[in-house]
Every structure is written in structure tokens, then in C-alpha cells.
Amino acid sequence: MRIADVTAHWLRAPIPPERQHVSDYGRLAWFDMTLVSVTTEDGLTGYGEAKAAVGSAGECASLVACIRHELRPLLIGQDARAITRLWTAMYNGVRAGYALDRGRTFPELGRRGTRIAAISGIDTALWDLRGKALGVPVVDMLGGACRDTMPAYASGGWAGVDDIGRQLQGYVDRGFGAVKMRVGVMDGSPEASAARVLAAREALGPGIGIMADAHGTFSVPEAKRFCRLVEPAGLDWFEEPVSPDNRRGQAEVRAATAIPIAAGESEFTCFDMRDLIEARAVDVLQPDCAIVGGITEAMRVAALAHAYGLRLAPHLWGSALSFMAGLHVAFAAPAATILEFSLGHNPMLHDLVEEPIQPQDGRFSAPTRPGLGVTPRPDFIRSHTVAV
């Protein structure tokens, strides 16, 4: 299983005006992703996703260049089955020999940001490739599924105070027992965000889980005020209350409330997650397989969650490839209890691949198809590739 080629494509799909939503990221008119493929000398191909941004839209040219010109030369001719060794080689670069010999990291300067996102896409593609070669789903190679099914929560919730209850009830009517809504700077004030959350709880009643996601946009005092105001709503968690650059501030918010704090979708590698934990800033870890370092690194984060008694809830807002990568990790991880499912318009989740991705009665079953279990459509790739 020698690697013959590694490719990367920037894909961009338009979102119809009637399906667009507005948040602190502005009006989202496009959905972008970096599609990564690894092909062996015998013609087998695995696929993964690398992310240039946590949200839907992002400029992917630098990721494509990193994969083509920095990482591809390290991989050609290598054994595709040696996933951990290849991850170490990509992360440590010319000092990979020291890392493998001494048993600790010797990373190059690009140990965060673009390079790690690029590694994420390649790593996921390698896992997909290995599963296809063995004829087994990735979850089986990670130790097997911990459970037969898992619940999903509907992720969306942009409507104003007068319509948020109706919007979220629409998610519940589709079978979801928990929903996530957006709050934060887009509302103008913590009081306005809290009013939307309280309206949501009044509309849904006590039996439906509600999460709130501020996308890191509150200040520390604003986040504390929001938490006090929404205490009666019994939130399942409050996600990214403040900027990911302010771990100490997030720890202050966590110490001031009984609401669990979720974070991690903006973090790179298990070392960032370790630092969040050590700062006592998080209750729910949310690695994104297209950002954190791929499936390999997401499983290391899962081990941290297990060791520290925290919940794991992978960030699954992306293409079908990063969604399935996170789903396999979640099923393999004892600390994971729930899956995110986007209710925003997402052509990369539903149109990129042949297989439908939909929960049944608000739940997903453990994956059984080889590799990630999804097949990218060549016609979609051709029609949505941005020249780089």
C-alpha cells in the first residue's frame, strides 16, 4: 500500500438565497471545503477534509498549497498503513526522526493553523483508505463501537425572539430530542440573547435539551451575565462563551455558573485541548476532525476526555467527510454521548457524496460500511472546484 499521490481541491458550493442564514459570520452565501485524497499504487483512494475556517465559508487556497507543496512530497512512496508514523512525520517535519527515536514531539513552526488542518485532511483520508483496504469501517479499527446507536441534536437556531420557538420546534418535529441555537454578539446584548433562549425554553417545554453557542463572541462579563439570565432555561451546555484566545476568561465564566461549558472546535491538536482542561475552562470537548489533526488526533482528545471525566461531542459542522470522521470517533469513544447534525443548508453534507446522511428518529446507527462509509461524487467535484 505505497502512496502514489496526494491531491487537494478547494470546493465551493452556493447556498440558495432562501436557504441562507445570518450570524456573527455575516450572511453565508457559500459553503467551502478542502477535499483531500490519498491514492495508492494499486489504485485505492481514501478521502478526507481539511478546514480553512470553523464556519461554512472560508478561503482554502493556502490549504491546497500546503498539501500540494509541503506535505505531498513527504508522503509519496510511503506505506499508507503506517498512519501514526506518517502523522508524526508531517507534524515534526525534518525532525521526525528525533521524534520517533526519543518518543516526544519536535514540531516545526507550523504546529498550529494551516499545517495542522492540512494534516487533518490527509490523516482522515489515510484512515478511510485503510478501512477500504481491509473492508471494515473506521470505527472497527478504533476499537469498535461503544454503542449501537447515538442520539443527535439539531444544530441551527438563528431566528429572532419571536420566531425561535417555532424554528426549534420544527427541529423537534423531525425527531430530535435536543437542539442548539446561536447567541452572542449577533443579538446585540446578553439580555437579547437570553430573551431568545428563554423564549425557546417556553416554546419547547422541559423535555427537550437546549444548547447555546456564542461562537466565542461575548466578553467575560457579558458571558457571566448571560449565564445568570438563562439559569431557569436549564441549558445542556453553553458553547464557546468567549474568544478561544481567552482560556483564563473562559475558566472564569465556567467558575461562575453551573451551566456546562463546551469548547474545542477552534483548537489544534490534543495539546491545545490539554491546556483547556488544565485551565479548568471546559466540561465538553469538541474536536473537529478537519481542524484538530484528523481522526488520529481526535482519538487522543477522546482519551483526554475519558481520563478527566469530561464529555466528548465532536464538532460535526462541515462536509460529509468530516462529519463521518467525527461520527466514527464518537462511536469509538466512551466519553461521547451525542452527535451534532446541521440543520443549515449544507451541500457538502448532502450533495457531495452518494450515500444519504440522515438520522432516523433523531438517532444515528453505528457505521458499518468500509472506511468512512461515503463516496464522493466526481461530477460534484468537477463542477464545484475552485482553480488554485
Image: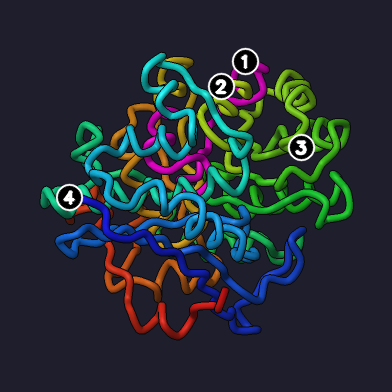
Q: Pointer 3: what residue?
A: 242
Nearer to the camera, 220 or 37: 37
Kind of residue at badge 1:
Glu
Q: Distance between the residues labelled 4 and 2?
A: 34 Å
Please state, as top left, top right, bottom left or bottom right, where the C terminus lies in the image.
Answer: bottom right
Kind of residue at badge 4:
Met
Kind of residue at badge 3:
Val
Sequence-first disc among 4 and 3:
4
Sequence-first disc among 3 and 2:
3
Sequence-first disc among 3 and 1:
3
Q: Pointer 2: what residue?
A: 274
Q: Where is residue 360 in the image (x, y as percent from the top left)?
A: 30, 59
Task: State whether residue 3 appears in this view.
Answer: yes
At 73% across and 71% down in the image, what residue appears?
27
- The reply, left or right, for residue 158 in relation to residue 24 is left
Q: Which residues lie in the magenta part? A: 277-302
Closer to the camera: disc 3 or disc 2? 2
Task: State whether residue 267 appears in this view.
Answer: no
Q: Pointer 4: what residue?
A: 1
Q: Is mark 4 on a helix, strand or loop?
A: loop
Q: Where is residue 169 in the image (x, y as percent from the top left)?
A: 55, 61
Nearer to the camera, 142 or 113: 113
